[in-house]
Image: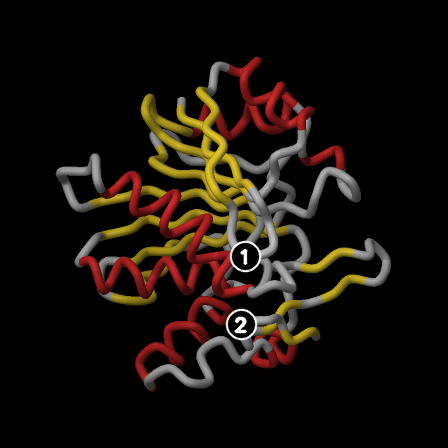
């Protein structure tokens, strides 16, 4: 477990020499890429107050938890679908302490995100329904007509098989027209794969420690 520059935690995987979140600030990274560039951008176009979000990898639960808090704050209903092959254990999840300084209600939501059963739709907070799928997102069934994809897999330098046109194409198909995929990765091969699939690519300013990020619209 590593403490990042904004005081929040991330996990380091020695076998991959890779972190789950940015060492420059795990919470800042999640807010910048997934909430501001993804969720808020879609809410600006959304008239129904509902979003369907797909996350490639549940990981520490940080992206899901911050999305939950943002949805409650904005009064938005969310269906959150996430696929994870290697979930954290209860002790590891509790050790992240993202909710340590939050209120009791917010802490319970974080705990419930990790504790709720796999493969079942669970209303963790009013209007926020999560469905965690235990499996490989290269093979697992994905929902249709999603508004946003959070693509937060480990980098293509260490897991290139997760960034191929074939795999990214599964998420293209999951999105509705006008849906967005947001990711920290700006690697040239990834951009070319996204363009080949039919995405319109935007390079946006990145979070602290990273010059750019990508937003791809179907």
Establish if 10 lies above or below 80. Answer: below
Q: Nearer the viewer, residue 208 or 218?
A: 208
Mark carried by residue 208: 1
Query: Disc 2 marks which residue?
Result: 6
Q: Is residue 125 left or right of residue 64?
A: left
Q: Position of residue 118 (x, y in %)?
A: 51, 58
Establish if 130 lies above or below 212. Answer: below
How many neighbours does mark 2 have within 10 angstroms: few (below 14), some (14-19), or many (20 or more)? Answer: some
Q: How far apart are marks 2 and 1 (CA)?
A: 10 Å
Q: In this view, does 132 lie to the left or right of 148?
A: right
Asked if the residue at tag 1 contacts the one at tag 2, i.e. Cβ–Cβ closer than 8 Å, the answer is yes
Residue at 70% from the left image edge and 75% from the top image edge: 1
Q: Position of residue 187 (x, y in %)?
A: 67, 32
Quadrant location, the C terminus: top left
Q: Position of residue 59 (x, y in %)?
A: 59, 59
Residue at 44% from the left image edge and 29% from the top image edge: 174
How many neighbours does mark 1 have within 10 angstroms: few (below 14), some (14-19), or many (20 or more)? Answer: some
């Amino acid at each position: 477990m590593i403490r990042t520059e904004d005081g929040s935690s991330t996990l380091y995987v020695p076998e991959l020499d890779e972190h789950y979140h940015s060492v420059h600030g795990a919470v800042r990274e999640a807010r910048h890429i997934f909430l501001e560039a993804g969720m808020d951008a879609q809410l600006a176009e959304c008239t129904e107050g509902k979003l369907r979000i797909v996350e490639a990898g549940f990981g520490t639960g940080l992206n899901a938890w911050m999305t939950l808090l943002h949805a409650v704050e904005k009064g938005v209903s969310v269906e959150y679908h996430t696929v994870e092959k290697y979930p954290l254990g209860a002790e590891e999840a509790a050790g992240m302490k993202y909710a340590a300084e939050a209120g009791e209600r917010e802490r319970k939501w974080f705990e419930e995100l990790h504790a709720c059963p796999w493969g079942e739709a669970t209303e963790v907070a009013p209007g926020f329904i999560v469905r965690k799928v235990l499996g490989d997102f290269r093979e697992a069934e994905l929902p249709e007509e999603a508004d946003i994809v959070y693509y937060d897999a480990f980098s293509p330098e260490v897991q290139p098989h997760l960034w191929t046109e074939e795999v990214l194409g599964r998420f293209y198909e999951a999105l509705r027209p006008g849906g967005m995929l947001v990711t920290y990765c700006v690697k040239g091969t990834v951009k070319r794969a996204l363009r080949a699939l039919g995405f319109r690519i935007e390079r946006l300013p990145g979070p602290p420690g990273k010059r750019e990020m990508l937003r791809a619209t179907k």
